[in-house]
Amino acid sequence: GEDVSVIYGHLYPGSNKVSVGDVVSKGTQIASVGTTGYSTGNHLHFEVQKKNKTKIDGMSLISFN
């Protein structure tokens, strides 16, 4: 019930398939994973923040069932 922002990093440049404010459903492809900066291979940086920029453990929001 709380507004959060999700930040995805290290995406393949220009691969975004959604825009800010879009509503997505489970399974929707939002971009392609790539490698940027000093990374050594493709991976996803997944960060969740509250409106006040407090970080939330994103793994606590994922159901692995």
Image: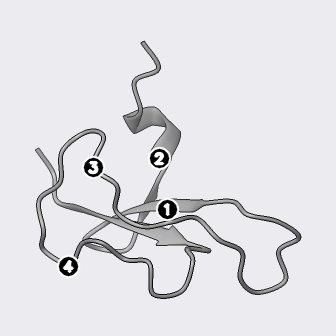
Q: Earlier in the sequence, mark 2 or mark 3?
A: 3
Looking at the rendered structure, the secondary structure element under dot 4 is loop
Q: Which one is closest to the eye, mark 3 or mark 4?
A: 3
Q: Quadrant of residue 22?
A: bottom left
Q: Which mark is residue 28?
A: 3
C-alpha distance separating marks 4 and 2: 19 Å
Residue at 42% of width from left, 67% of height from top? Answer: 31
Residue at 51% of width from left, 38% of height from top? Answer: 59
Q: Earlier in the sequence, mark 2 or mark 1?
A: 1
User: Does residue 50 lie above or below 56 as drawn?
Assistant: below
The x and y percentages for residue 3 are 16, 59
Q: Residues within 10 Å of mark 1 (few under 14, many from 20)?
A: some
What kind of residue is marked 3?
Answer: Thr
5 with respect to 62 (left or right): left
The residue beneath circle 4 is 20
The x and y percentages for residue 27 are 30, 40
Q: Earlier in the sequence, mark 4 or mark 2?
A: 4
Q: Which one is closest to the eye, mark 1 or mark 3?
A: 3
C-alpha distance separating marks 2 and 1: 6 Å
Residue at 62% of width from left, 74% of height from top? Answer: 10
